[in-house]
Image (cartoon, grey):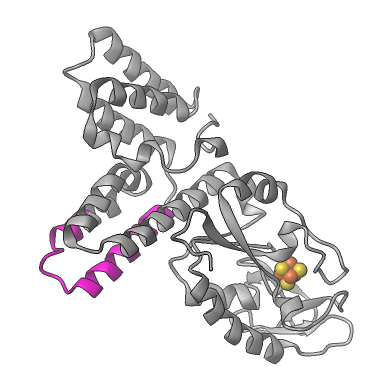
Amino acid sequence: MLSCMEKKILIGISSCLLGEPVRYDGGHKLDHFLTDTLSGFVEYVPVCPEFEAGFGVPREAMRLVDDPESPRLMTIKSGVDLTGRMNMWIRKKLPELEKRDLCGFVFKSGSPSSGMERVKVYDAKGAARKTGAGLFAKAFMERFPLLPVEDEGRLHDIGIRENFIARVFAFHRWKQQLAADRSPAAVIEFYARHKYLLMAHSPAMQKDMGKLVARVKTMERGSFLGEFERLFMTALKYHATVKKNANVLMHMSGYFRKRLSADEKQELADMIERYRQELIPLVVPVTMIRHYVRKYGEEYLAEQYYLDPHPAELKLRNHA
Ligand code: SF4
């Protein structure tokens, strides 16, 4: 069985996004970024709740109705309540997915089964509010609250895409760490290597994690690891903004203060400033810092995942 520990990262995905003809009308919603680009770095675990729950293809279209907090899944024309059948399938499916050790999930937006947010819920008069989540997506997110999730619509936004993929890769590294070595020394090193990545996402939570790590030897191991994972994945949910990235770049450039010539220092400072003004993409100053890391053998920075959080081929830092 493939798992998060093997070469490719396992990500759950709504089957129709892979081009599988499982929608109510026999169609699909192929998403080229997911199938042509991201697929080179992850292995997908397709899930179609409506097909797998036995509703067939083609099938009558359905929607969510009544209470947005606890909606029912009803067919639109014939008014058949499919909530019970869907929930029964969900109860069987979630433990199966838990065994797959997923590192993320990409949901189909807007679906009464698979949509993760802003799914239409209809009231008795037939008026819709975009306030719900699909039955499967909601149950999945409640069961795996720290797992990175997004929908394909939101992933078209480059900032959201970068954040999601950074979290998927970070979660994968954390799972690898847990499988390889859970000792206090190993977790301290894991934290140290993520320090600047965490700072780029949430400087406040990076400090909280520093305080937690300082208590590693006094806490019960299971509680410590649970709290570490919670803070780690929550911190990374914050977006790495231009301002926070520029702050990290300034911190990193401080390591070379005594080694760079006046010209080189000015060039690096100018580059960071140009990035701050959004004239050049993040990849430019990061590449220059990586160059100095190699040139001067700066080992602490060489280990920082901030400089290499996900594959360069995804071009997630190439946009000004
Ligand atoms: S949105 Fe979900 S339920 Fe609908 S076809 Fe896609 S995977 Fe199946």
Residue in the picture at 38% in, 47% down: 201
Residue 12 shows in this picture: yes
278 over 168 or under it: above or below: above
In front of the other: 43 or 261:
43
Answer above or below: position of 176 versus 54. Answer: above
Q: Position of residue 265 (x, y in %)?
A: 27, 15
**Magenta stretch: helix, strand or loop mostly:** helix
Point out the residue furthest to the left here. Answer: 218
On the image, the x and y values in percent for residue 240 come to: 42, 43
Magenta residues, as a range? 210-237
79 relative position to 309: left or right: right
User: Along the line of sight, which residue is nearer the eye, 59 or 95?
Assistant: 95
Which residue is drawn at the image coordinates 15% and 63% (left, top)? 216
Name the spot of residue 157 as percent of width and height, x first. 61, 45
155 horizontally vs 168: left or right: right
Left or right: 297 as drawn, with respect to 289: left
